[in-house]
Image: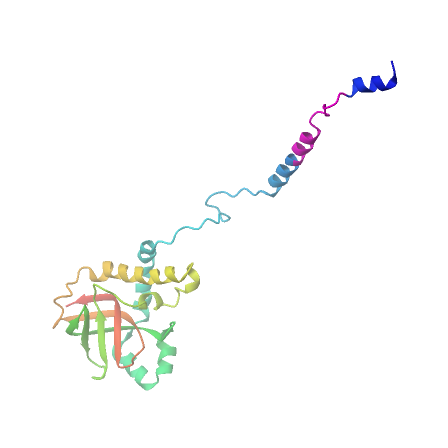
Amino acid sequence: MSSQSTINRRVTPGVRWPGVRWIVAAAAILVLLAAMALDTKVVVIGSAEDARKVAFSPEAFGKSEFPNVQSAVDQRAVAAGVLASAIAKDKAAAEKQYGVPANVGTEFSVKFTGVVGEGKSGIYAVKVDDVPSTLVIRVQTGPAINGTDLRDATGTITFGQFTNQIEYQNAGSALNNEMKKQVLSTIDNTKLTGKTVSVVGVFKLVNPKGWLVTPVKLSVQ
């Protein structure tokens, strides 16, 4: 038997060495999995490293933050007569002494007692002693409470605390809604004309001759 015929019997045409490429592929997968395992960090849910974003709740924000705003405004509130005199004398000095800078204008916390005049859409003029007759003080009593005075009153609630402008605006609306629940819900604002009210509130100084006050406290005598 020739050497050539022996080789032909040992190497049969069409037969390949078993699984060499599969072994190489499996090894590569194992290396990849090992690398992934080394690069994976286990984070415990609720820990400081848990980066999941909790959805912003305006209702929860208003409920938790309104008492803080109410307390801060109450502590900062200046008698209307004193504040009106200070603004008329030197607006810039009054802003520095009594005001809180806002996006547009300055927020002032104020307190007064006066007689309620005519109103429209829940906004009533209040005649207050010790202020110039040229100054018109009005108070929002709902049902609609406009503006962001409560949000901006203290200077401690800032845009950077929120994800976007929508959340920031919703925070202002939530404080207004919570104020209505806690302050205005027991007041019949259809029967205020002619009555004496005591108010603690905040307003943005846009027009020195017209204050639109958002209350944080309001009582009817």
Question: How many discs mark residues in the rendered view?
Answer: 0
> Residue at the spot x=28%, y=81% of the render?
84
Q: Nearer the viewer, residue 97 or 163?
A: 163
> Residue at the spot x=31%, y=55% of the render?
59
- The span picked out in magenta is 12-28
> Residue at the spot x=34%, y=65% of the render?
151
Position in image of residue 109 (x %, y %): 31, 72
Residue 96 in the figure: left or right of residue 215:
right
- Indicate the quadrant containing the C terminus: top left, top right, bottom left or bottom right: bottom left
> Residue at the spot x=39%, y=78% of the render?
96
Furthest toward the top, the residue is 1
Tell me if residue 71 comes above or below residue 12 in the rendering. below
Position in image of residue 219 (x %, y %): 19, 66
- The quadrant in which residue 83 appears is bottom left
- The quadrant in which residue 118 appears is bottom left
Furthest toward the right, the residue is 2
Position in image of residue 74 (x %, y %): 29, 68
Q: Does 94 lie within the magenta span?
A: no
- The quadrant in which residue 15 appears is top right
Q: Nearer the viewer, residue 73 or 33?
A: 33
Residue 147 in the figure: left or right of residue 220:
right
Tell me if residue 120 comes above or below residue 4 in the rendering. below
Tell me if residue 35 comes above or below residue 71 in the rendering. above
- Indicate the quadrant containing the N terminus: top left, top right, bottom left or bottom right: top right
Position in image of residue 148 (x %, y %): 32, 67
Furthest toward the bottom, the residue is 89
Q: Does 26 lie within the magenta span?
A: yes
* Coloration of the structure image: rainbow
